[in-house]
Amino acid sequence: MLGIPLESKDVSKESLLEVFPTTPVLAAWARGEDAEWPPMEDDDEDDIGPRPRLRFDIGKRVVCRVGPDPVTGWAAGRVVQLWYREPSWPANSWAPYKIELEDGRNIFAPGDVDQIIREV
């Protein structure tokens, strides 16, 4: 869904073009390819301010909470990225870890706490 901070009577072609995907992005989507949209305006890591120290480094083997059961709802994997974010997330929203699970799925840990991610 597209949100434009204008009343309908004030919407112009120019205001639509400012928030609508570009022609190359639309063409990539039409071909079934991934294309980053919306563009990340806060790519500069300096913009996120000071970061807390994380417990795990890249490559560390961990188990992550992937289900509701406190005993069986865990999956093993390894940390593949620190301070992960999705392009669609609000500015300055980050997850401490991106994890590649042993089954090949990629997930993120929304917090650096034992209830979400633990050392193997």
Image: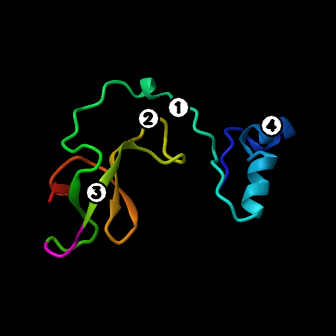
Please state if 42 lies on the left or on the right of 93 as rendered. right
Residue designated by label 2: 92
Q: In the rendered structure, which disc, 3 or 2, sits on the residue that comes first in sequence?
A: 3
The secondary structure type at the circle numbered 1 is: loop
Q: In the rendered structure, which disc, 2 or 1, sits on the residue that comes first in sequence?
A: 1
Q: Position of residue 90 (x, y in %)?
A: 49, 41
The secondary structure type at the circle numbered 2 is: loop
Q: State yes or no: discs 4 and 2 in contact (Cβ < 8 Å).
A: no
Query: Is 11 rendered above or below residue 66?
Result: above
Whether residue 115 is in magenta: the answer is no
Residue designated by label 3: 78
Please provide the residue range marked out in magenta.
71-75
Q: Position of residue 109 (x, y in %)?
A: 31, 53
The secondary structure type at the circle numbered 3 is: strand
Q: Mark 2 is on which residue type?
A: Asn
Q: Quadrant of residue 58?
A: top left
Q: Quadrant of residue 48?
A: top left
Q: CA distance from mark 1 to mark 4?
A: 28 Å
Q: In the rendered structure, which disc, 1 or 4, sits on the residue that comes first in sequence?
A: 4
Please state if 30 lies on the left or on the right of 41 as rendered. right
Foreground mark, 3 or 2, reads 3
Is there any visible trace of residue 52 in the rendered image? Answer: yes
Residue designated by label 4: 10
Q: State yes or no: discs 2 and 1 in contact (Cβ < 8 Å).
A: yes
Residue designated by label 1: 42
